[in-house]
Amino acid sequence: MKNLKKIIVGVISLVFLFSIVAQVPAAAAQVEIQKNEILSTIFTEVLELDSKFDNTIYLEGDYIALDTNLAIKQGATKTDINLAKSKIDGHNQITEDISTLQPYVVFDENGLNFDEESARKANVSEDLIVTTVKDFELMNSVGILADCKGKSNFEKTADGFYTYFDSCETATIITYIQIGAAIASLGLAIAAFIAPPVGLATIIAVGLYDIGAIALNLVNIQGCGTWIKWKGTNNPNPFWVGSQC
C-alpha cells in the first residue's frame, strides 16, 4: 500500500497547495477526493489485495490475473481469493467493454464520435451502446477549444509510464469525472486520445478518478495540458500529476 498512500498524500497535498493559490475551498476538495475513492473501489481493492499478498496479482496481456497458488502459499484464505477474483472480474469486464466498443469510436475536431449503428449491427450490447451514447454526449458538451495546448502522448518508462493530455483532452476528462459516467466510457476516450494498450486504458481511467476533477482542473488552470507519472509494471498507479506549462 506504500504507493497507494503516496498517491493519496500527493493528491491531497497538491489540492491543499492550489486551494491557497487558486482560492479553491478545502472542503470542496475533500468531498471530491472522498467521492472518487468510492468510485474507484474496484481497482483500489485489487491493489490492496496485491499489497497483502505480494506479486499475486499482475497484468496478463490486457487483463488482470491472479496467481492463486502463490496467494495460498502467502496465507490467502478462500475468502481473500474469492474477493480478489470478484474484483478482478469487475475490472476485466470494463476492459472487455472498452475492447468491444473501441472499433466504433473516433476522436476528431468535433469531439468523441461513436458509431452506434455499426455497433448495433455488430450485435454489441444495447445497454453498452445506450450508456456510451449518453456519456459521449455529456463529455462532448464541454466543447473543443480552438487552440489545444500541450502534447498528447503515452510514453513507457523502465518502472511504469507517463500519460500526457493536451488542454482540450484534459477538459474532456474533467467533464467526464464531474458527470460520473461509466469508467468504460472514459477508458474509450483515453484509448482515442493517446492509444495505450487496452488493458492500461482501464487502469488509467480508474486512476484519473482517483486523482479527481479538482486536482486535474488546478494543474490545467493555465491551459497547457497535464502530465501524469504512473509507477509500476504489474499494477501501475498514478504517482504524480502536473501541468505541461
Image (tube, helix red, strand yellow):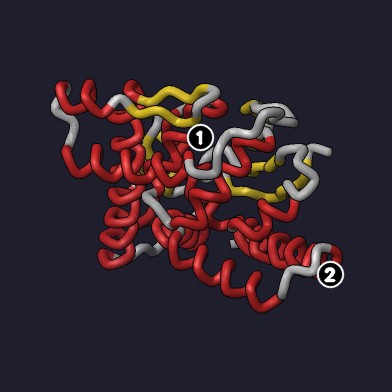
Q: Residue at x 19, y 44 (%)?
A: 127
The furthest residue to the bottom:
27
At label 1, the amino acid type is Ile
Query: Viewer-nearest of labels 1 and 2?
Result: 2
At label 2, the amino acid type is Ile
Element assignment for label 1:
helix
Q: Position of residue 219 (x, y in %)?
A: 75, 50
Residue 148, quarter of the rendered image: top right
Asked whether the viewer can see residue 163, the reply is: no
In which quadrant will I find the C terminus? Answer: top right
Image: 105 above or below 37: above
Which of pointers 1 and 2 lies earlier in the amino acid sequence?
2
Q: Position of residue 229 (x, y in %)?
A: 69, 42
Residue, disc 2: 20
Residue, disc 1: 190
Q: Residue at x 56, y 57 (%)?
A: 210
Specify whether 239 is left or right of 44: right
